[in-house]
Image (tube, rainbow, N blue to C red):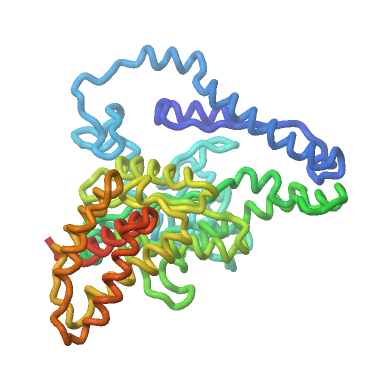
Amino acid sequence: WNTRFNNWLFSQFGTRLFLAQGYAPCSAGELTGACGGAARYRALFRSVSSAVAQHKMRRVSADQLRALNAAAARQDGRECAICGRSDALVKNGDRCVWCAHFEELSPRIQGFAACLVSNSQDGPCDLILPGGEGECRLSLLSEAALAERLAAGERVRHIYLKNAADAPLPAASCLYVGDYAAANSMEELAQSARGIRRLGVCRMDVDNLGQAFVSGFEKRDAEDPAAQYQYVCISRTAAFSRQMSLFFKRYINPLLSGDFGARRALRVAVVYSGGDDVFLVGGWDDVVEAALRVRNALEQYSCGALTISAGIGLFSDHFPIRAAASQTAQLEDEAKELPGKDAVALFGGAQDAYHWADFERQVLGEKMAALEQFFGAEEAQWGSSMLYGMLALLRDAQTDRMPLARYAYLLARLQPPRGAKNAGLYDAFAKKMYGWALDEESRRQLISAINIFVYRNRRRD
């Protein structure tokens, strides 16, 4: 089956997509930990991982190599406007076959109520995919259209109902889909951002999930080996996998729409959410809040046992989404480089990478709050030009000595007249700004806070 499926992927996408597989023989006792204990259980996972790695190293067969060498390259130089491939373009268009298909299917994936897998070879369908028993003809339908096709006596292989835990049809299965979208237009999402009109792109991934699957149920503090590995078995691992899938496919929707805790709906859209990772786009400020919601919710969901790291990039709404995804993946890698992970890397890369607790409490809860309190006061008469000046000095101090005299001059220009109502507010603000500027880590946090404050309060261009 794997060979047939990879041959189909190769025929449609070339070497861009590949499904690796691995397996290892075992007994029921080994899966439950009764035979060989946790050592054998771990060895099974290592064997499977090694088999998958070996398969990835030999992903192209000899016949496929011959087909690649024999294929004639396109001479006109045209590329798909979405994925960049230069073959299989739709006639007289700027999309390849699959990107055009995805573009057509995307709004239907958000709106469908049921997915019908039909055995009929000549009936209508939205997508044809390879299956274990021949082709799978998939149709995305409303409830009324599904009832109509069933009443007509169509031969059905399976029915999936989207996000319906209580399936009204006994033969149907529930298919959870993270499909929340405040809007489907990149321009509309960017326009909804507060301050600067920019699109936020967020990619998140659970930390050390493989280790959690293999040894997450060990009781390491137990002295008795039998008690230490009492809960290490495949059934708990499978339940853990199912609960992870539920979080990222089912609970992500109410988490972003504000149904949990009666919070406001965020102006973001889910590109992908499932397994252990999330890909979001939206107004840049709401994307930051969405990432915080997901992180805090996962911490509560797992009782603090799991952490997640994220990268958040800032882009124009006309920036290619595939390039934005690639750059944001690099930010995510920067976050995972921090000790212990559980971190986020913002727009500036490594210099804007923080553990979630530091980002939420120190950058947003302390520095950002101080800026908003001072510059947002009713008596405030200062623009952002002073902040830009201080930001330049703070950045210079990251690689050289702190120009304290110039920094003090800029702060002094913010001082209100004697007897003004906000004189006390200025004294407290200036004291904090001096202290933060002289401490390396606080200065780095202050730079990030000023950037976010300026983005949030920039006038519309």
Q: Residue at x 41, y 75 (%)?
A: 263
User: In the rendering, at what x and y percent does residue 186 appear?
Assistant: 26, 55
165 to 25, vertically: above or below: below
Look at the image and tell me in which quarter the N terminus lies. top right
Q: Nearer the viewer, residue 431 or 344?
A: 431
4 to 150, vertically: above or below: above
Look at the image and tell me in which quarter the C terminus lies. bottom left
Would you identify the image quadrant in which residue 188 lies? bottom left
Q: Nearer the viewer, residue 18 or 106?
A: 18
224 to 410, vertically: above or below: above
User: In the rendering, at what x and y percent does residue 387 appear?
Assistant: 19, 62
31 to 47, vertically: above or below: below
Residue 265 shows up from this direction: yes
User: In the rendering, at what x and y percent does residue 275 appear?
Assistant: 54, 50
Q: Residue at x 31, y 61 (%)?
A: 449
Q: Residue at x 44, y 47 (%)?
A: 335
Residue situated furthest front in the rendering: 405
Residue 272 shows up from this direction: no
Q: Residue at x 47, y 43 (%)?
A: 337
Q: Nearer the viewer, residue 221 or 6?
A: 221
User: In the rendering, at what x and y percent does residue 340 appear?
Assistant: 55, 49
Would you identify the image quadrant in which residue 460 lies? bottom left
Q: How many marks?
A: 0
Would you identify the image quadrant in which residue 256 lies? bottom left
The reply, left or right, for residue 103 in relation to residue 297 is: left
